[in-house]
Image (cartoon, rainbow, N blue to C red):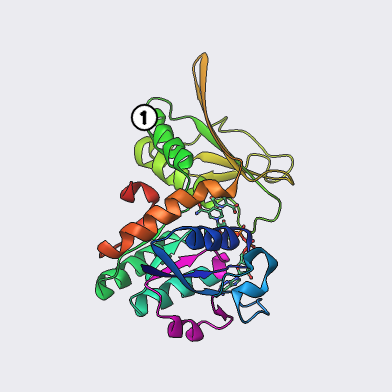
């Protein structure tokens, strides 16, 4: 059985990941961590009745649980330190938290190599999102004029989404740095044209009722192509999280994207 700890278990994704770990017979939930928790045992929460696991509210205290895997769905400003902590203790991180910079990832990859500890940081664990990014990269070879519209629930902290940033990075690999639109365009309201990544515009929509959605819209002369992905249920991320938990212990590097494990 693989011993797993879930960080951020009081949140939307952390709670879903905790349920996923409990449902899989080859996983053992050795603890859950969230600084806002007031419980001592997971089973005190009605949605986890009968499911005992120690609750930790302080980072160093989690070590007594001796996890092999650290699932992290927390907040951008905590996740880098959590991932570093996991690697320093040879615990394999499976991180879904977004907001990591390229420099953060590079530094953590170096640490993973030094520690000979495998792990994964993935801005999106859903298969449809991974395919949407790959199909978009393919299309950008022929349609370099593109705008990314990401749409999320209104409790999201980071903008643009981690998925939108990764999509833009992947598109930039094939289309390079290409300005778009009229070179003389002026924004009469600042921000009207969205964020600028290598000349591509990224628009972030935040509305109640949404979960996670992204549209990559390409334009050519007299034609257009739209590649769209929709998440209707957070359960959809769990196949990817479970797959990563099964694979990262055999790795000795920190991967940046679920596609490396598929
Ligand atoms: N990679 C993926 O497929 C997905 C990634 N996400 C990302 O996951 C993250 C969490 O999203 P939600 O669950 O919606 O957020 P949320 O706000 O519902 O939950 C975050 C939880 O982290 C806890 N937390 C804060 N500081 C912490 C720390 N130092 N250590 C441990 N826990 C801490 C909070 O108390 C809260 O319970 C976000 O960055 C989001 O973008 C969300 C969905 C899918
Ligand atoms: O906060 C979310 O909800 C999501 N965050 C990730 C991101 O920033 O890309 C993944 C997914 O879009 C859901």
The residue that disc 1 covers is 141
The location of residue 195, given as percent across then percent down, is 58, 46
The location of residue 240, given as percent across then percent down, is 43, 50
- Is 223 inside the magenta-drawn segment? no
Asked if 105 appears above or below 40 in the picture, the reply is above
Asked if 251 appears above or below 147 in the picture, the reply is below
Q: Which residue is the extreme one toward the top?
A: 222
Q: Which structural element holds mark 1?
A: loop
Q: Which quadrant is the N terminus positioned in?
A: bottom left
Front residue of 194/12: it is 12
What residue span does the magenta drawing correspond to? 53-77
Asked if 226 appears above or below 100 in the picture, the reply is above
Q: Residue at x 56, y 83 (%)?
A: 58
- Is 54 inside the magenta-drawn segment? yes
The location of residue 65, given as percent across then percent down, is 45, 81
Q: Residue at x 60, y 70 (%)?
A: 50
Task: Left or right? Give the position of 234 relative to 83.
Answer: right
The location of residue 185, given as percent across then percent down, is 63, 34
Front residue of 206/188: it is 206
| Residue 15 visible in rendering | yes
| Residue 198 visible in rendering | no
């Amino acid at each position: 059985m693989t011993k797993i700890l879930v960080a951020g278990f009081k949140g939307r994704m952390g709670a879903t990941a905790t349920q996923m770990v409990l449902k899989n017979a080859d996983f053992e939930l050795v603890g859950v961590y969230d600084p806002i928790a007031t419980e001592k045992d997971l089973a005190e929460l009605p949605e986890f009745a009968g499911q005992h696991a120690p609750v930790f509210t302080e980072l160093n205290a989690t070590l007594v649980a001796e996890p092999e895997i650290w699932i992290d769905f927390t907040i951008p400003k905590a996740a880098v330190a959590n991932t570093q902590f996991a690697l320093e203790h040879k615990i394999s991180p499976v991180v879904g938290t977004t907001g990591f910079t390229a420099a953060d990832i590079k530094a953590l990859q170096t640490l993973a190599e030094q520690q000979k500890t495998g792990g994964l940081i993935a801005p999106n664990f859903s298969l449809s999102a991974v395919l949407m990014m790959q199909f978009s990269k393919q299309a950008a070879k022929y349609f370099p004029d593109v705008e990314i519209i990401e749409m999320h629930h209104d409790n999201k902290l980071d903008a643009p989404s981690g998925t939108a940033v990764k999509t833009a990075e992947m598109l930039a690999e094939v289309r390079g740095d290409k300005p778009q639109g009229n070179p003389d365009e002026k924004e009469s309201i600042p921000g009207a044209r969205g964020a600028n990544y290598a000349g591509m515009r990224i628009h972030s929509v935040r509305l109640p009722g949404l979960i996670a959605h992204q549209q990559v819209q390409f334009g050519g002369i007299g034609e257009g192509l739209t590649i769209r992905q929709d998440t209707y249920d957070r359960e959809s991320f769990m196949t990817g999280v479970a797959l990563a938990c099964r694979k990262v212990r055999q790795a000795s590097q920190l991967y940046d994207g679920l596609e490396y494990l598929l």
